[in-house]
Every structure is written in C-alpha cells, then in structure tokens.
Image (cartoon, rainbow, N blue to C red):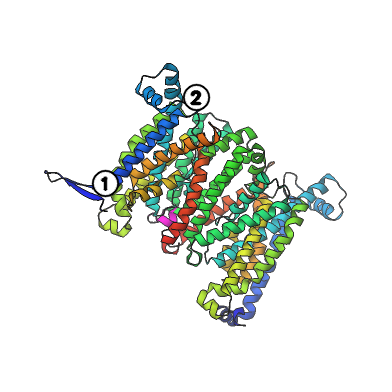
Amino acid sequence: MLVDSPPELREETAAAPPNRRTIRAVGLLVSVLILALVALASIAIGAKELSLGQIWHGLFEDSGTYGDVVVAERVSRTVLGLLAGAALGLSGAVLQALTRNPLADPGLLGINAGASAAVVTAITFFGVTSLSGYVWFAFLGAAAVGTLVWFLGGSRGATPVRLALAGTAISAALYGYLQAVMITDDAALGKMRFWTVGSLASATDSTITQVLPFLAVGTALALSLARPLNAMEMGDDTAKALGANLNRTRALAMLAATVLCGATTAACGPIVFVGLMVPHVVRSFTGPDLRWILPYAAILSPVLLLGADVLGRLVARPSELQVGIVTAIIGGPVFIYLVRRRRPAQL
Amino acid sequence: MKTNRAVRTPGGLSVRLDVRALTVVLLLLAAALAASVVLIGTGDFPIPAGDVLRTLAGDGDAGQEFIVNELRLPRVLVGLLVGASLGLGGALFQAVSRNPLGSPDILGLGQGATAGALVVIVLFSGSAELVTVGALVGGLATGIAIYLLAWKRGVHGYRLVLVGIGVSAIVTAVNGYLLTISDIVDAARAVVWMTGSLSGRDWDQVWPLLMLCAVLVPLVLANARELRMMEMGDEVSHALGVRVERVRALLMIAAVLLTATATAAAGPVSFVALTAPQLARRLTRSPGPNLLPSLCMGAALLVTADWVSQRVFGADQLPVGVVTGVLGGVYLLWLLVTERKAGRI
C-alpha cells in the first residue's frame, strides 16, 4: 500500500536502508536501557536512600521490613511515572502531527485544564471520590476543551500562535472557575491545591490499575495512527491522493490524545511541557517519520518525567518539589527557546 | 455615519475630533461615576444615592460621613483607578501585540504579581503592605523578563505573546508550589488575593495609584498618535517617522507599570484588561487603540462588577474577581468565536 511508505521516506530508506534502520533500532534499545536506569534511580532516591540490595530485597523477597514498604511505595510511583510519561509524550507527538504545529502540547492547548476543571467539578459538586469515577469526567473535559481549541484555533488553518492563544485563553477562564470553587470550599482547597500542580506522590497500586486500561487503549490507538498521520504531514491533498481517510484519522488522533491526557490528568493532575519537549528532541535524530517518533517519544518521555520527579525529590529534601512544577520550570525555557528560534512569519 | 470632524480655529490650528469616541468616553465616565455612587450606598448599612451625594459634598450626618468617606469611598476609588489602569494597560498590550488576546491576563503579568504576593504571604506571612510591594516587584520583574526574552532585533507581537505564555506557565508552576507548602490559613488568604478583591482597601492604596495614573496616563496619551500609526506595521510607521522600538518600549513599560500597580492594589482581577479594550472598540467603532475609551470602560466595568458581586452574593462574600472571571470567561469564548470568523486572532 502506498500510504505505508510515502515517497519521501521510501527514498530515504532506499538510500541507506540497513544502516539507518539499525541505528534507530539500537537507539531505541539504548533508550530502553536509559529508562531502566532512571526507573531504578526513582526507586532508590528519596527521603530515605535505598541500596541496590535493599531494592532487590523489596522487589523479590518482600518480608514487610521498613525498606520493603518504601520500595513498594516507590515502585507504584515509578510505574505511574512510566505510564504517565509515555502517555504525555505520545499525546504530544500526536497533537503536534495532527495540528502540524511544533508548539502543540496538551498543557498549552488547554486539554489538561479542561480535564482539571471537570475533575474538580466532579469532586465538589457531584461528590465523586474515586479515581475510576472521575476519570470519565476528565475525558469529557479534555475532549470538550480539545475540540473547542481545535475549532477556535482555526482547525486546519491553525497557526501555532492561534492554537496557543485559544488554549491559554480557555485555560485562564477554567482556572478562574477553579479558583472560585476553591474560595467557597475550604475542604476542596485543601485537597485541590496539591492535585492542581501535578504530582506522582499519591500513586498507589489501585491508581495504576484504574488508569491502565485507558492508557493501554490510548497508546495502541496512537501507535496505530503513525502511518496515516505520516501521510497527513505531507498536506491534505497529498494525503488524500495516498488514500488516507483524513476525517477518520483526525477524529481518531484527537480521541487518542484525549484519552491519554485525560487519564493522565485524572491520575496525577495537570503536567505541562513533557508532551512538548520530548517529541522535539526525538525528531532531531529520527527525522519526521512518526513510526519512529512515536515509540521513541513513548520511551523517552518517561525518562524526562521520572528524571524530573527524582530531581524534585533531590532539590527539596527531605520534602519534595512536585513533578508538574519541575517539568514547567525545565520546559518553560525550552518552549521560549523554540519560539525564539522561529521566524515571526512561522508563528 | 461620519463621526470624524475637524475643528479649525482662525489661527490656523486644527484638531481632529472623533465625535463618537468622545460621546462614548463621556457616557462611560458617567456610567462609572453613577455605579460608584450606587456602590458607595451598597453594603450592610445601605445609604440612598441622594444621601451619598450629600455626604460626598460635605453635609451628611456624622455616621454616614464616617461610612462613606472612611470606609467606602476609598474602596470605590481603588476600584475606579484599578479598573482604569487595567483598561489602559490592556489596550496598550493589545495594540503592541496586535492581538485582542495579547492582554496581561494571558501574558502572565497577573501570575507574576501573584508570585510576588505569594512569596510574601507564604514565606514571610507578611502584612498587607508588604504583599502589595511583593506583587509590584513580581509584576514588574515578569513584565521586564517577558519583554527582554521576546527581544530579538526588536519585539514582534506574536513572539511577545508566545514568550508571555511560556513565562506564564513557569510562574504558574511556582505559584502552585508556594500554595502547596503553605499552611491552610495562608493558602486561603492567598487564594482570595489571587482572585482579586476590593474589600478592606483604604486611602493608603488610593494615593500611590492616583499618583501613578497622574503621571502615566498623560504620558501614554501623548504617544497615542504614534501607537495608532504603528498599527499599520513597523515598516510603514517607520517610514512615517515613528521611532518604533522606542515608542514600543516606552509604552510597554507604562503598560507593565499600570498593570502591576493595579494588580498590587487589588490582586489580579481577571479579564478586565482583556475585555475593556474590546468592548470600548465595539462602542466607538474605531479601529485605533482606543486608549481613553478603554480606560473609562475598565473603570466602569470593575466598579459595576464589584456592585454585582455585593448584590448577588452578599456584602464581601465573594471577591470581585469571581464576577469578572465568570463574565469575562464567557465574553472571552464569544470573542474567540467571532474574532476567529473575522480572522483577527
């Protein structure tokens, strides 16, 4: 099928097929190794340092000692970080391809804010307390805001600045609403001020089992869209000529991004800029082929998220800096750098 | 309808007069003052408008005099001045960024001022005066940072907007962190501050605001001509003799000062800076920066919103920022839809 290998890419692979592909595959393997190391660091580092022996004991010979309990808690946190990171990276990459906009990020486009507002509404007004209950609200909010921003930003004629403005404007309105809720309800304030910064600290096994199905579906959907999205990157007309079903691809891509962001936001609160940064870094060495960008993003985004989480635990010891804050502080300057690098006409 | 008239004097001096804009300014001014009188009369101890006017003129009874002059007048004056500063600052930002959404709310100035205030509230449990100073410093620092980061052989409108959004995201994260490390009492105080409130404002807040406005408003209005020309694009205005970057820098500093001071006095009252210039432009039907109409519109909006919040929720139950936030949010959505159709954002 022609869609499978658009001319541009086929030429490239034809020029140096085995080499390029081997390098990319090896790179992917190295990325997995880096991820494993970061995950290990995330289990070992914290208010109480653990040695490798203690981690081994906690993982495989759990006998309920203090160290084992710490290991168990850090493992759930790390697993959630892995899942959330992969989800954010994938949704960022899909959104960037969908909007043909290198500055797209679930946080900047207001999708996180939509999920947040919906979750807070669920907690405060509908008395929903369990994650599995409000994750549906998160989807609803994420989907509503995502669609709204997409249309307000000018759908296919969207420019980076339009989308970012529409997203930020809607986020501002929604955060105003969140603040109003927090003023009127002290109990909600007590709970939500921790949730709205984005943190992995409250992760438990049940958090993971509750969001896992959604993330699995979202990930599978996102990965399966690599080829049609590749075709769409070449322009609507070419994509159509190549046999891609544009509207179906757009709808499915939006669905994938929404499910991934919604579930992540429900589990750990809004986290910005992870979905923006990683696809950029990845694209610089894989090139524009989404069949490589997506897996790389799924593996390297958790490296960033877990790394940020570990960093947050290191700099504010014995307390910690929430991961959402660390990613914003790292990601903000990256975003500004990307903006500055572009010519005004490209914005 | 032709609304521009040239007034010529025998001496050869002539002035272009926009009759519609002038009418709008006068009407808005009247509306702001009327709303102020009603607002002064509103509260746990209601005073009829006639009595308010009599007391303001100097012959009310002692009790009313205390309530009006010491308690409610300064609050209303702060409201008027904050609204005016936000309206003017917003108009400047929107003109410089050439985008109806390029207002201080979106660019993170409010967030920056909030960060300054939160540092004082959370880390030092400081007094109200210190919070004001902190907010001022935070707002100014953020404004300058955005301007410098957006600078690359001149400031381009879109770059300014996007850099502002980036800075705003960073500062929002810092604010979130400060909220999580505070105890619940400080957190509640911080959230009320963050929403923007006029309650408890007294003469100490009026004077600095008034002095700043007295300096900045004439300065800005003196540059209105250049700003109007700059809307045609940098090259054209340069050719017409406008020193583009100099005027832009001057007006941006003025806008940042106005917004930061207003935010320091009343908290980041959301969306006034965004909506006031837009509403003013719709009333005057003039494409220019509409500085004076925006200023009057801001003042009228804020005082009216404060009155609404007192009438709807009861005296000092919810801060004025909630009302502007909700109304402004709805207006913003409408604006996004219509401006998109017109292709202006």
Q: Which residues are magenta?
A: B151-160
Regarding residue B312, the answer to whether it shows in the image is yes
Residue A38 on image: x %, y %: 70, 57
Taking B6 as reference, is A156 above or below it?
Answer: below
Q: Main secondary structure of the magenta part?
A: loop
Q: Nearer the viewer, mark 1 or mark 2?
A: 2
Residue B285 on image: x %, y %: 33, 52
Callout 1 environment at 10 Å: few (<14), some (14 to 19), or many (20+)?
some
Q: Is residue A193 magenta?
A: no
**Both marks 1 and 2 on one chain:** yes
Mark carried by residue B176: none
Report in which chain the residue with disc 1 lies. Answer: B
Residue A150 on image: x %, y %: 53, 61
Q: Secondary structure at mark 1?
A: helix
Q: Secondary structure at mark 2?
A: loop
Task: Report the residue at 43% width, 24% height from top.
Answer: B68
Q: Are marks 1 and 2 in contact (CB under 8 Å)?
A: no
Q: CA distance from mark 1 to mark 2?
A: 41 Å
